[in-house]
Image: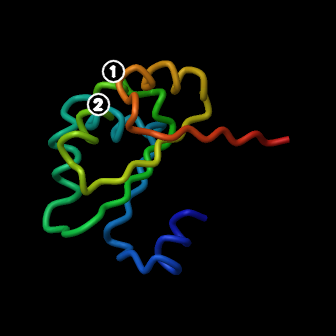
Amino acid sequence: MLEDFLIKKKKVNPASIFYFSFEDPEIRFQFNQNPREFIESKIKNLKGKIWMFLDEYHWIEEGGQKLKFIYDFYPQIKLFVTGSSSLELTFKTAQYLVGRCFYFFIFIL
């Protein structure tokens, strides 16, 4: 829904929107090994805002530090970080992102 909103309502170039699921072991391995290389390989030649959806982020080692790194060194990237383990995700990231993020909890009945 968010991707559709960005493309249709905000007129964001679809090439500037990325979705990564860290349930995929290869994606998780690449990101864990070198987040800078992973990010730069995806965004090269792009201008303006870049939107990244990072799903199942609780699988990432030292996830809070990596998010802070992306936030601080790539200001053009807007992050949407999700995970089915919301408590683990919150605890792993909160201490590194004070003042840098918003939390939304979606409860499914």
Q: Quadrant of residue 29?
A: top left
Q: Quadrant of the C terminus?
A: top right
How many callouts does the rendering have?
Answer: 2
Residue position for label 2 = 66
Residue position for label 1 = 62
- Please name whichever residue, 11 or 22, is drawn nearer the observer in this view of the structure: 11
Rendered residue at 36%/53% (across/down): 78
Tag 2: amino acid: Lys
Tag 1: amino acid: Glu
Residue 94: percent from left, percent from top: 45, 24
- Please name whichever residue, 55 or 64, is drawn nearer the observer in this view of the structure: 64
Q: CA distance from mark 1 to mark 2?
A: 6 Å
- Please name whichever residue, 50 or 30, is drawn nearer the observer in this view of the structure: 50
Q: Is residue 25 left or right of residue 33?
A: right
- The relative height of residue 84 versus residue 78 in the rendered view (above or below) is above
**Secondary element type, mark 1:** loop
Residue 77: percent from left, percent from top: 29, 54
- The relative height of residue 107 versus residue 51 in the rendered view (above or below) is above
Q: Is residue 100 left or right of residue 72?
A: right
